[in-house]
Image (cartoon, rainbow, N blue to C red):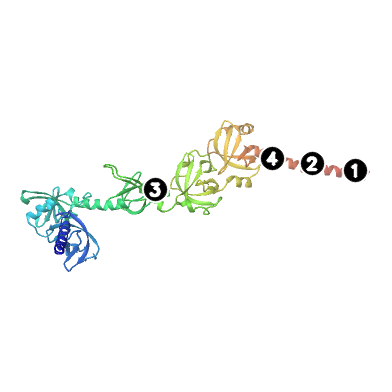
Amino acid sequence: MNDDIQNDSPEESFADLLESYESGMSQDIRIGEKIRGKIISIGKDTIFMDTGTKIDGAVEKAELLDENGEFSYELGDELELYVTVMTENEIVLSKALSGQGGLNQLRDAQMEKIPVEGKVTATRKGGFDVEILKHRAFCPVSQLDISYIETPEDYVGQVYSFLITRFEENGRNIVVSRRELLQQQRDAEQKVIYDKLTLDSEWEGEVTRIMPFGAFVDIGAGVEGMVHVSELSWSRVETPGDAVQVGDHLRVKVIGLTPAEGKKQAKIALSVKQLEGNPWDDLEGKFKIGEVVEGKVSRSAKFGSFVEIAPGVDGLVHISELSYEKRVTNPEDIVKSGDIVSVLIKDIDYANRRISLSLRDAKGDPWVDFKNNYAAGQTITGTVEKRESFGIFIKLVPGVTGLLPHSKINQSQDRSALEKLKEGDTIPVMIEEIKPAERKVSLSAGDSAEEANWQTHAKSEGNVFGSLGEKLQQALREKEKNNS
């Protein structure tokens, strides 16, 4: 009994080992398959990798050298390679078939979709001549790259990996494609990006296209997102081309994600300005009410013009605050987009993020100077601004206009001349009354001023002569009194 147990145990153990070995060998690995594994040994000429089976994979070290001929991998690094040979004793891995090969090897490569290394030797109608394993093949121009090829000559002499898509007439008609391999690589890279893509994540990208509504940015492997024109800058941007150009490198933030659905690709909304922070957040204390600052006119509307006084911070100059000198009906008659102007800060509403500005007050109120420099009874030369049925508006100084009423015109000695005045003509007038609070000046004609001055002078002289007469009469009376 004990002998039987001793004999059966080794047999069962060996059977288990054999089953385990065969199970490992039967894993789903086939010639032409692309597998990923870690480097477990680095020899002088050969690199060994863990294939996930009982047999390690081997790849020529020369295949893994970089452009400078250096081997930059270390133990534990992962590689993706193709299975080119698989037997009970070995698994040969490769980036692509290269060197020399017979027609059977080319046929196998086509059937198993194993990449082959080829050199572009010349351009021809519709594509390129490619040498693969010492045989000539043809690559259509649309299959050499993912992007549109503008200068085919740039590809001549270059070595790439290709897939054989057609093998006919015993190798006399071989067609290859590089595009499919590139697309496979791009799909893998895009999957990595989409797996990492989340709201508020930040990416480095390159501007690929500019449209009227925004700029498209490639954040890697052809994955594009769109930065709407309103998200390019806190400052107002009229057109995306004013802020960015194709080829510019930007840091962007993901602010919206719409998953892919059917044939529709995922939509990615990006922002540049949200990485910079809202300028309103630290604006408090930087400006004071009553302060005069310089800004740039960003746009105009029917009700006024917006002036940017700090990057991303616009204030409104209401249409009534544009000018003291004339009544404004269209803000663009005074300022235009892009103009640099001085404005006075009238009010700041941090809660609602609004700033009220004045263009006219920044220049000073002309009524203040006029009230201080002129008085009733003073004569001044003005310019006819416009005529109305009730009188003539006379511009006295920039920003101050007075009214010569029709009643005063009728009283004038030069009535006919006054009635012939045209816009732009100059005329002497006398200031009758100044009302600064109402911003009104009443005027009379220049001849009235001259008459008033003459009457004042005559009255003054009359008083002098009257006093002298009285003194003479008094002196005569005193003389007569003394004689008597």
Q: Looking at the picture, which amino acid does disc 4 mark?
A: Trp
Q: In this rendering, would 377 be left or right of 261?
A: right
Mark 3–mark 2 distance (CA, rounded to whole Å): 88 Å
Residue 358 visible in rendering: no
Marker disc for residue 480: 1
Contact? badges 3 and 2 (CB < 8 Å):
no
How far from the left and from the top, in percent, is residue 114? 15, 54
Comes first in the chain, label 1 or label 4? 4
- Reply above or below: 17 against 107: below
Q: CA distance from mark 2 to mark 4?
A: 18 Å
Question: What residue is pinned by disc 2?
Answer: 466
Of mark 2 and mark 4, the one earlier in the sequence is: 4
Quarter placement of the N terminus: bottom left
Callout 1: SS: helix
Residue 170 can be seen in this image:
yes
Which residue in the protein does label 3 denote?
231
Frontmost of labels 1 and 3 is 3
Judge left or right: residue 403 versus residue 57: right
Per the image, label 4 sits on a secondary structure element best described as helix
Q: Quadrant of residue 360?
A: top right
* Neighbours of disc 3 within 10 Å: few (<14), some (14-19), many (20+): many
Amino acid on which disc 3 is placed: Glu
**Nearer the viewer's eye, disc 1 or disc 2?**
2
* Residues marked 2 and 4 touching at CB (< 8 Å): no
Dots 3, 4 in contact, CB < 8 A: no
Query: Which circle's residue, 1 or 2, is located before the other in the chain?
Result: 2
Q: Which residue is mark 4?
A: 454
Nearer to the camera, 194 or 466: 194
